[in-house]
Image (cartoon, rainbow, N blue to C red):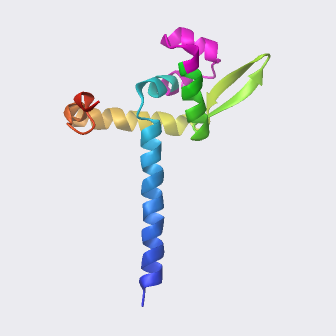
Amino acid sequence: MGTTTDDAALVDERAALTAAACLFRALGDPARLAILRHLLLGGHRVVDLTAHLGLAQSTVSAHLACLRDCGLVSARPQGRASVHELTQPELVLETLRGAEQLLAATGDAVTLCPVTGEDAR
C-alpha cells in the first residue's frame, strides 16, 4: 500500500548516500585537502599553489579539475592565468573543522583501520 512512497524514500536515501560518498572520495586525497585548506586563505593561481605546496603543476591542475568538477572550486580569469577559489568557503571550513574534531575524538584511530588506514594503501 505505501510501497511507492517507501521505494521513493529508499531511492532518495541511496542517492544522498552516494553523493556523500562521492564528496568524501573528493576529500580523500591529501593533496586535494592541502589545496582546499590553502584556498581557504583566498584565491590562488596554479603557480602559487605549486610553490606553496611543493607539488608539480600537473598534479595541482589535475586536483583542481577534480575539485571544480565536484563543485567545490571555481576559476576566474586573471590576465593569462586563472584564479581558483572555493565556491563554499564557509562550508568547507566547517567540514574540515568537523573532521578535525572527529579525528581528535577518536584518537586518529582511522589511520590504523585495516580497510582505510595508512597500511591499507
In magenta segment, residue 103: no
Q: Which residues are magenta?
A: 36-58
What residue appears at the point 36 percent right and 36 percent down from the top-left corner? 99
Could you say which is closer to the camera, residue 120 or residue 77? 120
**Residue 91 horizontal/vertical position (percent):** 51, 40
**Quadrant into which the C terminus falls:** top left
Q: Can the viewer see residue 13? A: yes
What residue appears at the point 54 percent right and 27 percent down from the top-left corner? 63
> Is residue 12 placed above or below 80 in the rendered structure?
below
**Residue 34 horizontal/vertical position (percent):** 46, 23
What residue appears at the point 58 percent right and 15 percent down from the top-left corner? 57
**Quadrant into which the N terminus falls:** bottom left
Residue 71 location, quadrant: top right
What residue appears at the point 49 percent right and 10 percent down from the top-left corner? 54
Relative side of 55 to 43, left or right:
left
In magenta segment, residue 48: yes
- Majority SS type along the magenta span: helix
> Is residue 111 placed above or below 53 in the rendered structure?
below
**Residue 90 horizontal/vertical position (percent):** 53, 36
Could you say which is closer to the camera, residue 31 or residue 56? 56
Q: Can the viewer see residue 41? A: no
- The number of numbered badges drawn on the structure is 0
**Residue 82 horizontal/vertical position (percent):** 71, 22
Q: Which residue appears farthest toward the right when viewing the image?
A: 79
